[in-house]
Image: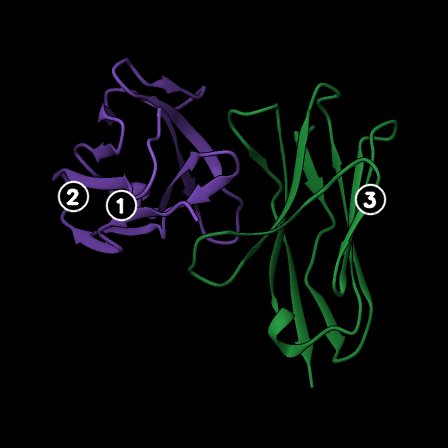
Chain colours: A green, B purple
């Protein structure tokens, strides 16, 4: 079993759609959780950290369920510029990060 | 914010040669840096953790004699791919922790 598993993609959605990404992790001792965005041939960029209480940043909402070891990312009113690969990332408190395989999102006009 | 500068961004080399990749933390001191590798359509896989002033810690399956890591100062870590082969062609990227995590811009290595 992979340490971090994400929905297989790609997701192809029209502009304005709402899209949800799911992620599960295997290490119950994990302490830090993130969603990163990676554009083609570029380095990953932090989209948002994920907290137990859930958190929202504009059109993006992230949730964490520690009991189920499950993380989600919801994108509302998707834009063309949201097209990218979204990486679920899990880590201990400090230290190395474990990346999911990524879910590719393509937003079409 | 914290910036990590990675060079070169792209390199093409012949089989059997060695390639050095540098990562510098520009506005903070990085006691620890992480080196990742990403093959096409795959996720980033941690190769090793680079510790300033001590030996790097390698992940299982990563050859330490092939991927030489040096972290001689608090602002510079280097990864040298020795005797490169075409299967070493990949996207190599470093990151450092400063409170959050920041990534270098990556190096695309092509071995011909």
Residue extending farthest right: A67
Nearer to us of marks 3 and 1 is 3
Q: Give the residue displayed 53% in from the left and 44% down from the top.
A: B43
B11 sits left or right of A76 in the view = left
User: Which chain is home to disc 3?
Assistant: A
Mark-to-mark CA distance, 2 and 3: 49 Å
Label 2 crowding class (10 Å Cα cut-off): few <14, some 14-19, many 20+?
Answer: some
Q: Does label 1 or label 2 sit earlier along the sequence?
A: 2
Q: Nearer the viewer, residue A81 or B88?
A: A81
User: Which chain is home to disc 1?
Assistant: B
Vertical side of B61 occupied by B101: above or below: below
- Which residue in the structure is indicated by mark 3? A54
Q: State the image quarter where residue A17 is shown.
A: bottom right
Residue extending farthest top: B54
Q: Give the residue displayed 32% in from the left and 22% down from the top.
A: B63
- Which residue in the structure is indicated by mark 1? B86
Does label 2 lie on the same chain as label 1?
A: yes
């Amino acid at each position: 079993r992979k340490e971090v598993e994400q929905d297989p993609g790609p997701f192809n959605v029209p502009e304005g759609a709402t899209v949800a990404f799911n992620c599960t992790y295997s290490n119950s001792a994990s302490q830090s959780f993130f969603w990163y965005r990676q554009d083609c041939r570029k380095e990953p960029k932090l989209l948002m950290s994920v907290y137990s209480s859930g958190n929202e940043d504009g059109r993006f909402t992230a949730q964490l369920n520690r009991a189920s070891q499950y993380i989600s990312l919801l994108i509302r009113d998707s834009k063309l510029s949201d097209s990218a690969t979204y990486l679920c990332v899990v880590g201990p408190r400090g230290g190395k990060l474990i990346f999911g395989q990524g879910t590719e999102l393509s937003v079409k006009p | 914010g914290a910036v990590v500068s990675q060079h070169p961004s792209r390199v093409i080399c012949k089989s059997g040669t060695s390639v050095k990749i540098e990562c510098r933390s520009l506005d903070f001191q990085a006691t620890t840096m992480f080196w990742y590798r990403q093959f096409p359509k795959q996720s980033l896989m941690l190769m090793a953790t680079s510790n300033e002033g001590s030996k790097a810690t390698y992940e299982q399956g990563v050859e330490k004699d092939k991927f030489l890591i040096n972290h001689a100062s608090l602002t510079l870590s280097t990864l040298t791919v020795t005797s490169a082969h075409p299967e070493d062609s990949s996207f190599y990227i470093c990151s450092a922790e400063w409170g959050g995590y920041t990534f270098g811009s990556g190096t695309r290595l092509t071995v011909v």
